[in-house]
Image (cartoon, rainbow, N blue to C red):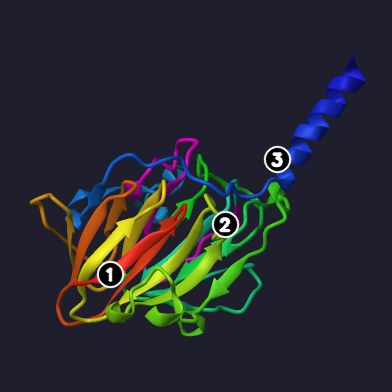
C-alpha cells in the first residue's frame, strides 16, 4: 500500500511540474467594460504590502482558480527579489520600461507595446525604469502566487521577450478577417488558430478609424494598450471613452462599434478563443 501511495504522489508531482498552460477559456456570455475609474486596485503580493507593485483587476479573479487579467503598476527603480510564480503569465507593457529575466541577465528594457511570457516555475526578477510603469498581465488559471526560487521547476515552456520594434505587423489585405478598407494592422503574439484554441494578437487601428469588431468566438477580450477609443455595443446607447489600461469583453456574435479619438492610432491587445471580424464604416 505504501509503495502504491508513493507512486501515486510521484505521478501527481510529475503531472504538476510538466503540465503546460491550458489552451482554452470558458464560454463568455455577456459584454463588459472596465473604465479607468472602475479598476479596483490592491497589492500584487499582499504579504509585501507597499513594497509590492499595485495590481488592478480587469477581468476574472487572480486569487481564484480560473483565468484572469489585471494591471500591474511599478514604481520607478523597482526591482523584485528573485522568485518564481506557480502559473505561467503573459504581459504587455502599457507605460514605461520593464525588464523580466534571470537575475544575472543584462537588463533588456521593454518599452510600451512590448510583449513577454514568463513560464511557471522559472526563477526571474522584474524591474522597472520609467517615470510611470504599467503592464497588463494575464494568467490561464489561478491562483497567481509568488514563491521562493528554492521551489523552481521546469514546466516545459520557455520565456519570451519581444521588444515592440521586433513585432511583425501584417496589413489588412494579408488577414482574411480584417477588411482591406479598414487599414488595420495585426501582429500575432502567441497561441494557435485551431478551432477553439486560445491566441493573442495586437490590433493597430489607424487615426480616424471608425468601424466595428464582431466577435464570432466563445470568448473575446480586448485591452487598450495605446491611444483613446470610443466604445459602444451595437444596439446599446452607452458610449465609453477608453484609454490605455482599460478593457472590454465581448459575448459571442456581439458587435462593438469602435472610434479612434485624438487623431492618434490606437493599439488593442486581443485575447480570443476563435474568430472575430474587423470592418470600417
Looking at the rendered structure, which numbered label has been put on residue 194? 2
259 relative position to 18: left or right: left
Looking at this view, is 189 or 73 the one in front? 189
Q: Pick the quarter of the image with the N terminus.
A: top right
Q: Is residue 73 magenta?
A: yes
Disc with the residue nearer the chain's start (1 vs 2): 2
* Magenta region, residue range: 57-84
Rendered image quadrant of residue 71: bottom left
**Residue that sits furthest to the top in the current view:** 1
Residue 145 vs 88, above or below: the answer is: above
Q: Point out residue 53 in the picture as x, y percentages from the top left corner.
A: 40, 56
**Residue that badge 3 annotates:** 16
Looking at this view, is 170 or 155 the one in front? 170
Residue 112 vs 196, above or below: the answer is: below
Looking at the rendered structure, which numbered label has been put on residue 279? 1
Residue ID at (65%, 58%): 123
Q: Point out residue 55 in the picture as x, y percentages from the top left corner.
A: 36, 52
User: What is the C-alpha distance between the residues marked 1 and 2?
Assistant: 23 Å
Tag 1 secondary structure:
strand
For the residue carrying disc 1, how many other residues have a C-alpha within 10 Å: few (<14), some (14-19), or many (20+)?
Answer: many
Residue 89 vs 171, above or below: the answer is: above
For the residue carrying disc 2, how many other residues have a C-alpha within 10 Å: few (<14), some (14-19), or many (20+)?
Answer: few
Predominant SS along the magenta part? loop
Residue ID at (36%, 72%): 178
Amino acid at each position: 500500500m505504501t509503495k502504491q501511495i508513493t507512486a501515486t504522489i510521484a505521478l501527481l508531482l510529475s503531472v504538476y511540474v510538466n503540465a503546460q498552460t491550458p489552451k482554452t477559456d470558458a464560454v463568455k456570455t455577456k459584454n463588459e467594460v472596465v473604465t479607468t475609474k472602475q479598476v479596483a486596485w490592491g497589492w500584487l503580493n499582499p504579504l509585501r504590502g507597499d513594497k509590492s507593485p499595485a495590481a488592478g483587476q480587469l477581468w476574472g479573479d487572480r486569487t481564484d482558480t480560473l483565468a484572469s487579467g489585471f494591471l500591474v503598476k511599478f514604481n520607478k527603480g523597482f526591482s523584485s527579489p528573485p522568485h518564481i510564480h506557480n502559473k505561467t503569465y503573459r504581459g504587455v507593457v502599457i507605460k514605461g520600461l520593464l525588464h523580466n529575466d534571470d537575475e544575472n541577465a543584462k537588463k533588456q528594457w521593454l518599452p510600451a507595446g512590448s510583449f513577454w511570457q514568463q513560464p511557471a516555475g522559472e526563477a526571474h526578477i522584474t524591474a522597472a525604469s520609467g517615470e510611470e510603469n504599467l503592464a497588463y498581465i494575464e494568467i490561464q488559471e489561478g491562483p497567481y502566487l509568488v514563491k521562493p526560487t528554492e521551489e523552481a521547476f521546469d514546466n516545459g515552456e520557455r520565456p519570451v521577450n519581444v521588444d515592440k520594434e521586433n513585432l511583425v505587423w501584417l496589413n489588412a489585405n494579408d488577414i482574411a478577417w480584417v477588411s482591406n478598407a479598414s487599414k488595420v494592422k495585426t501582429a500575432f503574439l502567441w497561441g494557435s488558430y485551431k478551432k477553439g484554441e486560445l491566441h493573442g494578437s495586437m490590433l493597430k487601428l489607424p487615426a480616424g478609424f471608425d468601424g466595428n469588431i464582431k466577435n464570432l468566438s466563445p470568448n473575446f477580450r480586448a485591452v487598450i494598450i495605446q491611444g483613446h477609443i470610443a466604445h459602444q455595443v451595437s444596439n446599446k446607447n452607452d458610449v465609453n471613452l477608453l484609454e490605455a489600461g482599460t478593457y472590454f469583453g465581448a459575448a459571442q456574435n456581439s458587435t462593438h462599434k469602435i472610434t479612434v479619438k485624438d487623431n492618434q492610432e490606437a493599439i488593442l491587445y486581443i485575447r480570443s478563443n476563435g474568430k472575430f471580424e474587423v470592418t470600417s464604416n
